[in-house]
Amino acid sequence: MPSAKKPSVRDRRREQELELRRADVIAAASVVFAEKGFQGTQVVEIATAAELGLNTVYGLFKGKEELYEAVIQDAATTMRDRVQAEVEALSDPAEQLLGVIDALLACFEENRHLLRIYSQSTHGLPWRVRQGLGDGSFEVFRDFTIWLFQIASRAKDSGALRDLDPETFSLALIGAVTTTAAKWTEAPTEDSLTALAPRIRALFERFLEREE
């Protein structure tokens, strides 16, 4: 059986240029979607922000829904990688759970456009668009949740959580953080988002104290 033809230098260069253009469009789209939401955004605005022609953007993405899916997946992957890297630097599983609170809120505050996109993708997203999203974004959210379940299970095995179910605890933690962040981005207060972290930590610390 003949071996597959290796891509030429020109082919590789073209692939790299396409990837760079896709990255530019996704970066521009993330800003526009964060400012105007899905319904209020037009593809021509994204093309203008990316400094590319409209036909070029449509050559890279089929339409606005595919662009939105790419932006959500990029945002979700960025936040997941950032949070996991910081949390996995901690050794104690109970501290890791509390570290998720700190890392998520810090990531949201430093990347407010990602927070707005996250909020839009999980609250009030039109069902037609939700159905149209690919599996990639939901796999990122699902894998992050499974990762958190595993940490909570190790925490319980180490004597924390007492009689609480690790899965329920994990879902409650994610809910508290994301709801607080979404509310903050809709109506920012004088407090920074990271300044709210100790309040959320206090809600969960009592359940992570190990019985003597």
Image (cartoon, helix red, strand yellow):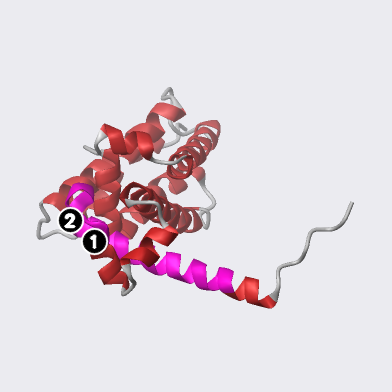
Q: Position of residue 16 (x, y in %)?
A: 56, 71
Taking 19 as reference, is 105 above or below it?
above
Question: Is residue 120 within the magenta segment?
Answer: no
Q: In front here: 171 or 162?
A: 171
Residue pointed to by mark 2 = 36
Q: Residue at the spot x=23%, y=64% of the render?
A: 45
Whether residue 197 sits left or right of residue 92 in the image: it is: left
Residue 72: image x %, image y %? 36, 50
Horizontally, residue 26 falls left or right of residue 15, namely left
Q: Is residue 116 left or right of residue 141?
A: left
Residue 156 image offset from top left, x and y in percent: 50, 32
- Viewer-closest of 31 and 116: 31
Crowd tier of the residue under label 2, counting other residues whose Cα lies within 10 Å: few below 14, some 14–19, many 20 or above: few
Query: Residues in magenta?
Result: 14-43
Image position, residue 196 (x, y; %): 22, 52
CA gap, disc 1 to disc 2? Answer: 6 Å
Q: Confirm or deny contact between disc 1 and disc 2 (CB under 8 A).
A: yes
Q: Relative to the observer, which residue lies in front, 102 or 33? A: 33
Secondary structure type for disc 2: helix
Q: Would you name the residue on which mark 1 appears?
A: 32
For residue 204, above or below residue 196: above
Disc 2 marks a residue whose amino acid type is Lys
What crowding class fits label 1: few (fewer than 14 Cα within 10 Å), some (14-19), or many (20 or more)?
A: many
